[in-house]
Amino acid sequence: MWALRSIGATHAAGPAGWMMEHVRKGMAMKSEEERRREIEEEDRQLFMPGLTYGEYRRLTEREQHRAYQKFTQLPATVLGYWKSCSLSPCRRAKRCKGFLTEAQYEERYHRACPPCVGNSVERHAEIVKTLNALLERAKELQRAREEKGRK
């Protein structure tokens, strides 16, 4: 009971209590037109290769994980994780092609990474570091193309 008093009545009431608190403070609810405009804006914002932010948000949770896994397969390939992967399609293709199975979800594998990363904190950190390096390299190439186009 102490925890409920310490976080306040509006937070203890959950989202409905939080919403009512904002309405009481004079914040108006969004109109249908404003919500439609926000959805259209989300549909224009590129979130990851092949998906806008609006498209991503409409995916189920598992589909979102699969989209992230597709995105992190490139750094896993660059790092050579396919060489020791338990999935034969990855080894044959000499690149990461794997997605998590239901059993791997239950084993608490990292949901944004392919199965070769597993639940290893070190491998996940390497994936993030490599992904950032690849994105920086892509930005450098884009700047170089723009510079070349100006000349």
Image (cartoon, helix red, strand yellow):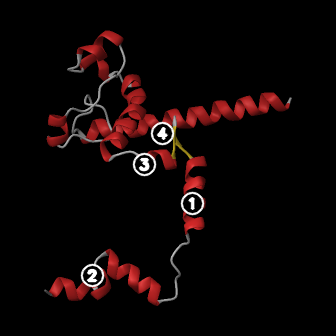
Please give the name of the residue rendered at 35% of the width and 40% of the height, measured from the top-left corner. Answer: 63
Q: Which mark is residue 19?
A: none
Separation (CA) of disc 1 from disc 4:
33 Å
Residue kind at label 4, given as amino acid type:
Asn
State the residue at coordinates (84%, 32%): 150
Q: CA distance from mark 3 to mark 4?
A: 26 Å
Q: Nearer the viewer, mark 4 or mark 2?
A: 2
Regarding residue 73, the answer to whether it shows in the image is yes
Pick out the residue farthest to the right. 151
Task: Inspect the image, locate mark 3, and give the three-letter code of the amino acid beneath it.
Answer: Arg
Quick one: label 1 or label 2, which is nearer the N terminus?
A: 2
Which residue in the structure is indicated by mark 4? 132
- Residue 49 visible in the current orientation: no
Question: What amino acid is found at the position of numbered circle 1 in the picture?
Answer: Arg
Q: What residue did someone put label 1 on? A: 36
Residue 58: which numbered mark, if any?
Answer: 3
Which of marks 2 and 4 precedes in the sequence?
Answer: 2
Q: Residue furthest front?
A: 32
Residue sitting at 39 percent across and 37 percent down?
Answer: 67
Element type where label 3 sits in the image:
helix
Q: Residue 40 at x, y = what percent?
A: 59, 53
